Amino acid sequence: MLSESLGAESDPAIVLPVNGSSVPMVSFSHVSIWFDEHKVLDDVSFTVHRGQTLCILGRSGVGKSVALRILMGFLKPQVGSMRVEGEEINGLSEEGMQAIRKRVTMVFQNGALFDSMTVRENVAFPLREKGGLAEDQIQQIVDRLIRMVGAEDVAEALPASLSTGRKRAVAIARALAAQPEVVLYDEPTTMVDPIIARRLGDLIQRLKKQLGFTSIVVTHDMRFAERLADQVLFLHQGRAQFFGPLREFMESTDPHIQQFLTLDAYLLPRE
């Protein structure tokens, strides 16, 4: 339970649902999307079960972030089926997608924080939007979330004064305040130094272990993926070149995967 992990056993509405169902939490089935005549995703399929972390890998421009935007309903594919715990979302109305977005939330590259609000106010925003909590309860939850992401020292700061890494950590805290079941991360290590990247990786892993979150992480950073992934989806020219366990991906003899791993090792030597 999220409430217990945050040390707030009596806080209302801070409980993640428990579900032993074998139905995937997220599934794409033969999804294709194109803009004008350019096909960005071409017949892509994958599944993510509750509590798993899927890393979507590939070079820039292969459609990694497009997959997240489809899942959020920001883009609609021309072909295919997308389900959240068995519920078809392709073709849902905006009202229907609003209900899905209460279960699935996204941490954007830029954090997408409200510039005019402090860190504390940003994290409190989803709780106030949802309603049903007294102000002292909101502040208790906010305090715990801010501590969880290590942002206590900037709680009263405005986003403009924060580093890129700090903005992303605060964005994660705000995402958690919405009490989602699935968290999507769009290139969380882009434009941050290796130390901050490790901290973000540790945070995402801790959320999985302590709170049981289902996560989909878009990244081009293989070292980051190695720390997090249960499953890997590797996109090449918009197609799913590989989908399966991390170990099988690392051992694959596919030339496109080998080229990706070799270039990643060359650009990002291990410490």
Image: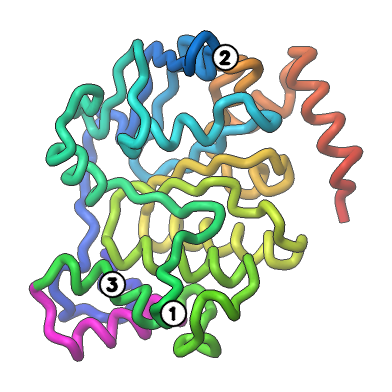
Q: Is residue 136 magenta?
A: yes
Tell us which disc is closer to us: 1 or 2. Answer: 1
Q: Earlier in the sequence, mark 1 or mark 3?
A: 1
Instruction: Classify mark 3: helix, strand or loop.
Output: helix
Q: Residue at x 65, y 54 (%)?
A: 189
Question: Which quarter of the image is occupied by the N terminus?
Answer: bottom left
Q: Residue at x 86, y 38 (%)?
A: 265
Instruction: Classify mark 1: helix, strand or loop.
Output: helix
* Main secondary-structure element of the magenta-colored stretch: helix
Q: Amino acid at mark 3?
A: Phe
Q: CA distance from mark 1 to mark 2?
A: 39 Å
Nearer the observer, 219 or 54: 219
Judging by the rendered image, the residue that carries numbered circle 1 is 119
Q: Amino acid at mark 2?
A: Arg
Q: Position of residue 96 (x, y in %)?
A: 14, 37
Tell us which disc is closer to us: 3 or 2. Answer: 3
Q: Earlier in the sequence, mark 3 or mark 2?
A: 3
Q: CA distance from mark 3 to mark 2?
A: 38 Å
Q: Position of residue 229 (x, y in %)?
A: 57, 41
Q: Residues within 10 Å of mark 3 (few under 14, many from 20)?
A: some
Q: Which region of the structure is painted magenta?
A: 132-147
Judging by the rendered image, the residue that carries numbered circle 3 is 125
Judging by the rendered image, the residue that carries numbered circle 2 is 239
In the displayed structure image, the side of residue 70 where residue 202 appears, left or right: right
Q: Position of residue 104 (x, y in %)?
A: 31, 46
Q: Position of residue 201 (x, y in %)?
A: 61, 58
Nearer the observer, 270 or 129: 129
Nearer the observer, 24 or 28: 28
Res. 263 mark: none
Nearer the observer, 51 or 30: 30
Q: Amino acid at mark 1?
A: Val
